[in-house]
Image (cartoon, rainbow, N blue to C red):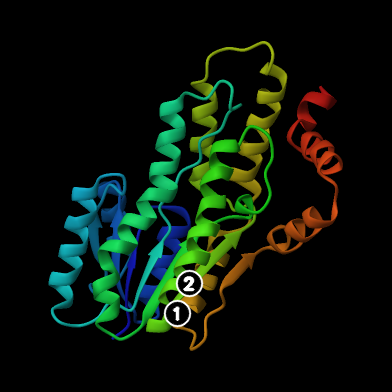
C-alpha cells in the first residue's frame, strides 16, 4: 500500500494534500504542529489517516515522529515524504530581528532536512521512494520585504537539487513543487510578523503597501487544491518531474527574470510591492 508522511497537514496546502491523498486510497501520516488542527483534519478523513504532532524545529520531536511512523508501518516501507510545513516572516532585513531570521530558516530549511533524514531508512525499505519539497516561486525570484522567506526557499531549491543527485543511484526520486501566489493562512501570519516590527518612518509607507499585498495574496491567491493535485502526481507518477511550477506566475516570472537586467527587474518589483503607497 502506498504510504506518505506529510508535514504541515494542519491547514492550507498540507491539509488539502492530506485529504486528497487519503481519498485516493493512500495511507497518510499527517504531521501537524497543533493537534487541534489535526483533530479537524481527522474528522474529514478516513480511519486510515493518522495524525501526529511534530515540531520540525525540535530534533527530538522529529525523531519521535519517525519512530511513530516506523511503528505503524511495521516492516513495510514508506513510499514518500512530503515536506509542506513552513512559515513566512516578512519585513525589511534591516529591521528583522536575527532570531526571526533563525526561526525562518529553522522551520523552512532545517526542518525539512531533519524530517527527510529521519525517514530515509523507511524509504529505503522499498528500494526506492519519493521525497517532495514544497518550495515556491519565491525560491526563484525575490522582492523587497520578504528577504528571509526568499532565502529559505532558495535554500530548498539547492537542497532539492543536491539530494536528487545524491539519491538517484538508489532509485529515490526528489521533486520540488514551486507554487505561485496561493491562498493560504501563511500570508495572514506573515502580516502578523510585519505588525511586530519596530516602528520606522523610513519604511512605513512601503511596509503598509506590502502588508496590503500580503492580505491580497491571502484572499485572492490560487486554491491550494491545485498544489495538492501536483503533489499527488509527484507521489504517484511512475516518473515524477524534478520540478513542478504551479500557476502562471510560477511558470512565467522566473523565465522573464532571467532575461531582465537586475535594475530593471528591481524597479518592476518595487512598483508591484508598493502599489498601494503610490496610489494613496
Label 2: which secondary element: helix
* Depicted 175 relative to depicted 114: above or below: below
Inspect this view and state whether residue 8 appears: no
Label 1: which secondary element: helix
Cα separation between marks 2 and 1: 6 Å
Q: Quadrant of residue 113?
A: bottom left
* Depicted 34 relative to depicted 44: above or below: above
Q: Which residue is mark 1?
A: 168
Q: Nearer the viewer, residue 139 or 159?
A: 159
| Quadrant location, the C terminus | top right
Q: Nearer the viewer, residue 14 or 171?
A: 171
Q: Which residue is found at the position 23% from the left and 58% from the top? A: 52
Residue 164 - label: 2
- Number of residues whose C-alpha sits closer than 10 Å to that of mark 2, classed few (under 14), some (14–19) or many (20 or more): some
Q: Which residue is found at the position 62% from the left and 38% from the top? A: 214
Q: Is residue 275 left or right of residue 44?
A: right
Residue 76 - label: none
Q: What percent of the width, then of the height, locates residue 184?
A: 52, 49
Amino acid at each position: 500500500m502506498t504510504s506518505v508522511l506529510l508535514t504541515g497537514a494542519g491547514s492550507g496546502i498540507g491539509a488539502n494534500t492530506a485529504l486528497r491523498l487519503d481519498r485516493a486510497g493512500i495511507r497518510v501520516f499527517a504531521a501537524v504542529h497543533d493537534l487541534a488542527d489535526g483533530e479537524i483534519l481527522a474528522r474529514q478523513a478516513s480511519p486510515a489517516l493518522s495524525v501526529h504532532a511534530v515540531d520540525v524545529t525540535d530534533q527530538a520531536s522529529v525523531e519521535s515522529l519517525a519512530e511513530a511512523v516506523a511503528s505503524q508501518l511495521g516492516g513495510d516501507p514508506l513510499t514518500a515524504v512530503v515536506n509542506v510545513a513552513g512559515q513566512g516572516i516578512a519585513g525589511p532585513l534591516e529591521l528583522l530581528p536575527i532570531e526571526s531570521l533563525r526561526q525562518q530558516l529553522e522551520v523552512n530549511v532545517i526542518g525539512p532536512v531533519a524530517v527527510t533524514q529521519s525517514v530515509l531508512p523507511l524509504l529505503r525499505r522499498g528500494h526506492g521512494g519519493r521525497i517532495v519539497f514544497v518550495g515556491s516561486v519565491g525560491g526563484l525570484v525575490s522582492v523587497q520585504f520578504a528577504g528571509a522567506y526568499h532565502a529559505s526557499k532558495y535554500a530548498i531549491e539547492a537542497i532539492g537539487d543536491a539530494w536528487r543527485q545524491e539519491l538517484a543511484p538508489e532509485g529515490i526520486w526528489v521533486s520540488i513543487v514551486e507554487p505561485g501566489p496561493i491562498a493560504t493562512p501563511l500570508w495572514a501570519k506573515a502580516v502578523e510578523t510585519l505588525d511586530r516590527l519596530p516602528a520606522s518612518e523610513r519604511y512605513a509607507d512601503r511596509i503598509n503597501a506590502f502588508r496590503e499585498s500580503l492580505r491580497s495574496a491571502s484572499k485572492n491567491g490560487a486554491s491550494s487544491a491545485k498544489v495538492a493535485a501536483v503533489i499527488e502526481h509527484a507521489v504517484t507518477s511512475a516518473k515524477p518531474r524534478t520540478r513542478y511550477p504551479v500557476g502562471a506566475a510560477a511558470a512565467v516570472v522566473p523565465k522573464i527574470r532571467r532575461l531582465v537586467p537586475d535594475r530593471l527587474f528591481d524597479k518592476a518589483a518595487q512598483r508591484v510591492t508598493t502599489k498601494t503607497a503610490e496610489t494613496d
